[in-house]
Image (spheres, rainbow, N blue to C red):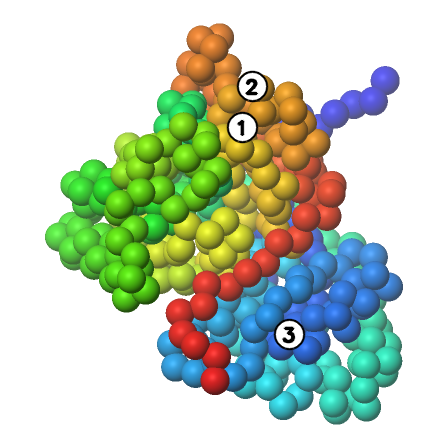
């Protein structure tokens, strides 16, 4: 008879890093700093087992705050505790230089190796050099032992995908209950999607730990609204997603009131920029767009080791380095998309479970996933990545 791992309440088996942080995965990341290097990075991952990478269109002809945000995201992905070591792969002439990104990641104490396509004489030699470097790191990573760690060391990202009329009644409140549990354990819960909090900002401002945080709530909401007005659109006039409307939502405010439930009832301790690492424990708001992949990337770059993703429409979304636990808001969709969805919160709608009971079930899943259980997105190699661009390309 096969013996399954027994998880201790409030604990998980993780990988302790040299900077004291804890990973729930032990990846070697092949990090392309420029779109021109992404296919080379992909080929390295195909050669070397235990490596991950991602495709993107960024890394050159970016300036100012847009440059800084992309740079911060690259560095954050490399510094995420789920990553053992990094091969930073550049072309050589791009704006986001591989050596600069590698230097910032190395400050975390991780092993970091830089490879340049131009310096190594082209694609084939860069693939060979990158594969050699990755092989060394993967073998080192395979020797690291897991240890019992407390939930206080977790940063949980929370996200609401395509919603339906059940989202604000089932999965989102259940995630809110989990968020409060993580906070009670001494951990950190990230609330994101500023776009989908428009109309509910006053509820969060009222829970801010001080006037400075409350003021920042209104500032980021106003800035997000102004971006849409500059494009000739009043985002408050209706829900921007056809899927949300088809799911039964009538307005963005209705979407926001449901999405805000992911924040539970804990005080709002901090409001941070996109891809920034929280400086405080407890409930933290990261200023991100509502775009699923861009907000997911921002939270992971900010240090989230696990992400809870609710959906009323169904989604295959995942991350290259962080397990994404997908939670359905209704049973019909869960049954239809079992290969993508991990948990069903539709039982709340059916009256067979309470919000608190589903929250405890999700918390148990976090313990198992953090200890090594693979999510559906990981099994299907759903390595989504996208950076929120806040400036034009030059």
| Quadrant position of the N terminus in the picture | top right
- Which residue is situated farthest in the front direction here? 232
Q: Earlier in the sequence, mark 2 or mark 3?
A: 3
- Label 1 residue SS: strand
Q: Mark 2: few, some, or many residues within 10 Å (few <14, many ≥20)?
A: some
Whether residue 65 appears in this view of the structure is: yes
Q: Which residue is mark 2?
A: 331
Q: Residue at x 64, y 21 (%)?
A: 335
- Number of marks drawn: 3
Who is closer to the viewer here, 254 or 128? 254
Left/right of residue 274 with respect to residue 367 in the rendered view: left
Q: Position of residue 360 (x, y in %)?
A: 48, 23
Q: Which residue is mark 3?
A: 35
Q: Residue at x 68, y 78 (%)?
A: 36
Q: Mark 1: few, some, or many residues within 10 Å (few <14, many ≥20)?
A: many
CA separation, marks 1 and 3? 34 Å
Q: Residue at x 64, y 74 (%)?
A: 35
Q: Residue at x 43, y 77 (%)?
A: 392
- Label 3 residue SS: helix
Who is closer to the viewer here, 187 or 353? 353
State the mark number for residue 328. 1
State the mark number for residue 263. none
- Which residue is situated farthest in the top direction here? 352
| Image position of 170 with respect to 50: above or below | above
Left/right of residue 261 with respect to residue 22 in the rendered view: left
Q: Are marks 1 and 2 in contact (CB under 8 Å)?
A: yes
Q: Position of residue 280 (x, y in %)?
A: 34, 53
Q: Position of residue 205 (x, y in %)?
A: 19, 45
């Amino acid at each position: 008879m096969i013996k399954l791992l027994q998880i201790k309440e409030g604990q998980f088996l993780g990988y302790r890093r040299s900077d004291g942080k804890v990973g729930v995965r032990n990846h070697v990341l092949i990090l392309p700093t420029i779109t021109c290097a992404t296919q080379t990075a992909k080929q390295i991952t195909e050669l070397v087992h235990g490596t991950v990478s991602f495709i993107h269109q960024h890394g050159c002809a970016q300036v100012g705050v847009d440059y800084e945000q992309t740079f911060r995201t690259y560095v954050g992905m490399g510094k995420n505790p789920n990553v053992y070591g990094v091969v930073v792969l550049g072309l050589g002439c791009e704006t986001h230089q591989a050596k600069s990104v590698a230097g910032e990641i190395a400050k975390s104490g991780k092993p970091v190796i830089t490879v340049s396509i131009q310096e190594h004489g082209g694609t084939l030699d860069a693939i060979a050099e990158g594969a050699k470097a990755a092989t060394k790191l993967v073998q080192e990573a395979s020797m690291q032992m897991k240890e019992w760690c407390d939930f206080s060391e977790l940063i949980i990202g929370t996200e609401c995908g395509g919603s339906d009329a059940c989202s604000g009644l089932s999965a989102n409140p259940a995630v809110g209950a989990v968020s409060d549990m993580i906070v009670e354990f001494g951990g950190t819960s990230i609330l994101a999607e500023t776009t989908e909090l428009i109309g509910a900002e006053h509820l969060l401002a009222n829970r801010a730990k001080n006037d400075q945080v409350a003021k920042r709530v209104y500032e980021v909401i106003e800035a997000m609204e102004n971006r849409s007005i500059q494009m000739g659109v009043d985002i408050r006039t209706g829900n921007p997603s056809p899927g949300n409307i088809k799911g039964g939502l009538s307005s963005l405010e209705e979407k926001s009131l449901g999405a805000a439930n992911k924040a539970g009832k804990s005080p709002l301790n901090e409001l941070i920029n996109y891809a920034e690492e929280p400086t405080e424990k407890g409930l933290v708001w990261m200023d991100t767009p509502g775009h699923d992949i861009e907000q997911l990337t921002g939270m992971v770059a900010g240090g989230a080791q696990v992400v809870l993703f609710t959906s009323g429409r169904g989604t295959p979304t995942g991350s290259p380095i962080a397990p994404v636990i997908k939670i359905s808001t209704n049973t019909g969709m869960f049954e239809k998309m079992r290969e993508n969805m991990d948990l069903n919160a539709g039982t709340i709608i059916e009256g067979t479970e309470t919000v608190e009971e589903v929250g405890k079930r999700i918390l148990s899943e976090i313990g198992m996933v953090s200890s090594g259980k693979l999510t559906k997105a990981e099994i299907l190699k759903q390595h989504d990545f996208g950076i929120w661009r806040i400036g034009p390309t030059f």
